Every structure is written in C-alpha cells, then in structure tokens.
Image (spheres, rainbow, N blue to C red):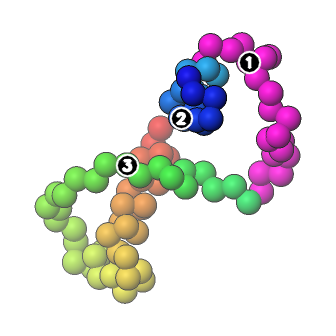
Amino acid sequence: MNKNRLPTAEEQMVTLKQKADKDIDFSDIPEITDWSDMVRGKFYRPIKRQVSLRIDADILDWFKNHNPQYQTAINTALRQYVHAQQ
C-alpha cells in the first residue's frame, strides 16, 4: 500500500474485522450517556408497494382533513395496529 494514500472505508473495515473488540481504540469517540434526543428508526425506510385499497369514505375524509400527508398517516395507523397485535 502507498504510504501517502489513505485507506478506503472498505480497507478500514477489513482491518477492523481482523481485530478483537478489546484491541480497537475507541478513545476518540465520545460515549453517549444521554439518549433523550435520539430518534428511533430515523434512517429506516421500508420498501413501499403501491396497492389499490377500498377504504370507507368517512375514514378517508377524516385522514385527508387531519393530515395533508394522509397516505403516510394511514400507513402509520396501520403500522401501530400491527405492532399492537404482536
């Protein structure tokens, strides 16, 4: 390897994978002790599929009147329902 060239991220990952956890220097990474501002799933983006779905008109109207992103709101409500069933 050329001493003037910085290693790529892939090369760094290979090097890190070869080390034991106790041999990795974490001193330049501050420990997080306060998680109050963290957001769960911030970068999680599930795959979306387009479907045709019949919804009662009054339910659809309610979502449209309460949220300009009503499709996302419906998806969120369905996701909360699914998680409550588990």
Instruction: Determine whether 26 is above or below 1 in the image.
Output: below
Residue 12 lies left or right of residue 26; in this view the side is left
Give the mark nearest the N terminus, 1 or 2.
2
The residue under label 1 is 21
The residue under label 3 is 46
Q: Residue at x 22, y 68 (%)?
A: 55
Disc 2 versus disc 3: distance between alpha carbons?
29 Å
Q: Position of residue 81 (x, y in %)?
A: 43, 52
Residue 60 lies left or right of residue 66; in this view the side is left
The residue under label 2 is 8
Give the magenta part as a residue range: 17-36
Residue 54 lies left or right of residue 22; in this view the side is left
Give the camera-side residue of 19 and 71: 19
Amino acid bearing label 2: Thr
Which quadrant of the figure has residue 56? bottom left
Amino acid bearing label 3: Pro
Give the camera-side residue of 26 and 11: 11
Q: Residue at x 74, y 60 (%)?
A: 37
Q: Residue at x 37, y 49 (%)?
A: 46
Front position among marks 1 and 2: 2
Q: Residue at x 80, y 27 (%)?
A: 25
Disc 1 versus disc 2: distance between alpha carbons?
21 Å
